[in-house]
Image: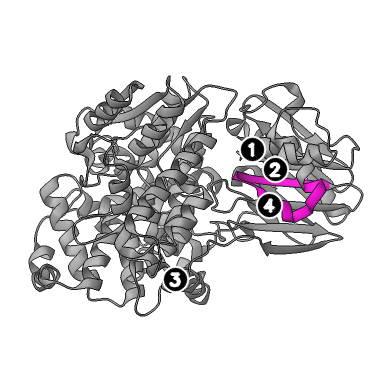
Amino acid sequence: MCGITGIYAFNLVGGFSMINLSKATTALERRGPDFQDTYHDESVGLGHRRLSIIDISEAAHQPMTDASGRYIIVFNGEIYNYRVLKQELEAKGYTFRSTSDTEVLLQLYIAEGKESLQKLDGFFALAIYDKAEKSLFIARDRIGIKPLYYYHDEDKLLFASELKSLLAYGIEKEIDFTSLYLYLQFNYIMAPATILKGVKKLMPGSYLYIKEGQVQEGTYYQIPYDRQAAQRNPMSYTQQKEHLKLLLEESVQRRLVSDVSLGAFLSGGIDSSVITALASRHKPDLLTFSVGYKEEKFFDETAYAQEVSKKFNTSHTVFSLSNDDLYAHVTDIMDYLDEPFADSSAIAVYILSREVGKMVKVALSGDGADEIFTGYNKHAAFYKVLNGGISGLVIRAFGPVWAGLPRSRNNRLTNTFRQLDRYSKGAALTSRERYWSWAGFTSEVGAMNLMSASARERLSLQAFEARKEAILKYIPDKEIVSDLLYTDVHMVLTNDMLTKVDLMSMANSLEVRVPFLDHKVVEFAFSIPDDSKINGSMRKRILQDAFRDILPENLYNRPKKGFEVPMLKWLRREMKSKIINDLLEDDFVREQGIFQIDEVRRLKKQLFSSNPGDVHARVWGLLVFQHWWKRYFKT
């Protein structure tokens, strides 16, 4: 796991940016603290920060050059099947100077060009320079586990693992207000856009090929999904369960390859418990880690995690956090963000990664299962809407009642009222608008009301509608649950969940591997019918049934908690001064000119009221943006 950056200069003007190559590489230090180096000639520069995982010797340092000196690679990620690929290449006469997956990747590209991507089993962002052809090939893994940003103008193309590296080249900073509008709705920004105009994210399963000043973008992979064929899958449910067990065990086993210490996140939920169970079969000395909350038992699942650890005889560590612990790290987290990102569970992931990173360099996680096997409340809600039933009708009929009751995520009762209110409102919408509503924290109107008049003028509604359509195109008028999952993979998984884990783990120099997102597992999930994944009483049905016989019974069909943090209470107490006297202070908001001061005041008032609803998420999104804006724009 590493950080990469680079430049392709189209002319002498673009070449001036080469002086910032070392600075841009250093900006990625936390992604790779073990080694830094750069390569450059008159038109191309490559930078690399290394977190040594496979072949930790100097022979595996990057940028890496092949024996002929013609090809140079920088690579972030892991290729799990590199040993098999190496054997195939050796049979064809290729020789190797290291035992690294990086060199295998380089030699495979030399042998097969961009078609080599089809053979890779792993996660990555890479760049390979061909000195003879003066071409640069850049690619990102199938699912988008590893990020890649790029900036392209008439003089140059820049790329990097993080936006802060691109900023080190001195590119112009201009806020994309269409991105801000979307951010205010969802608390993250959807690829390929970023918060800055001119900067893009390379999409999952895509590549760039640059030669003679021309930039070609292509797609080498899309998750196959035939909704009708999936519903008619000839495998019996029993056969599906057995196949899933086989695929997941193979996926976990491949992800145990490492030349350094390795452990697993264990939250106590079904996903991480399955990964722990499978990993413990092949690694008897497995270390597992979980995070709990001393003062917030409603959010604490460590008892379940400890039960799983005991069953599989792992060496388990619990990091028990107080609200003070959360507050102590919030500035570090926000300082690390080079683009607004306000999934509050990132705080817990950051602290968990920070502590785990002191003990191991690689951790397995259960991320991805929710999006491909129906892990969220919205999936159950969609199922209820699509399949009718008296309970759904009753909830909708009592809509005015739910709207009048206190709603928040802070305890079981008020969280139930909140969910009932969201359901009754969303059920009345069209399929696409229902998805958009349930995926976000506020409506388009709510986000627009928060923006100042000058900010609205710089917002392109045409661009917004195009981005919205790019996501919702996967949902037909008569959707099935798998359509929603396919949309989640392209929207929520890539832009929120994977971004969160990558940012927070890399901020602490920890590599996180996600067995559920092996492309074979993902493809299988989209090849089976809805009723294998969800029914009226169970989400993630096939996952729970497939592993029920090996997991503690207490985990079976247990309500999902998620990796949430007690944000509401924290904002009302520890963060109150920062809200009132700093980031959302009236004079600062007025001087900044981006937000409507009256609407900001209304959100603050609601936050401290007895009926906060989901406003804490909106306030946290504002705080993250304000902190980011002060760092990068306030002079």
Earlier in the chain: of badge 4 and badge 1, it is 1
**Residue at the spot of label 2:** 5
Give residue 45's mark.
Answer: none
Earlier in the chain: of badge 1 and badge 3, it is 1
Asked whether the residues under the numbered discs 2 and 1 touch, taking CB atoms below 8 Å apart as contact, a structural biologist would say yes
Using the image as rendered, state which of residue 268 and residue 441 is in the foreground.
Answer: 268
Position of the C terminus by quadrant = top right
State how far apart marks 1 and 3 are (Cα): 40 Å
Give left or right: position of 427 versus 247.
Answer: left
Q: Where residue 430 appears, x then y in whole percent?
A: 30, 78
**Residue 342, visible in the rendered structure:** no
**Residue at the spot of label 1:** 3
Give residue 229's mark.
Answer: 3
State how far apart marks 4 and 3 are (Cα): 27 Å
Using the image as rendered, state which of residue 170 and residue 211 is in the foreground.
Answer: 211
Earlier in the chain: of badge 2 and badge 4, it is 2
Mark 4 secondary-structure assignment: helix
Earlier in the chain: of badge 4 and badge 3, it is 4
Mark 2 secondary-structure assignment: strand
Residue at 24%, 28% in the rendered image? 307
Query: In the rendered structure, which amino acid carries the disc numbered 4?
Result: Leu
Q: Number of marks in the image?
A: 4
State which region is magenta.
Answer: 109-129
Magenta includes 24? Answer: no
Q: Residues within 10 Å of mark 4 (few under 14, many from 20)?
A: many
Residue at the bottom extreme, as displayed:
477
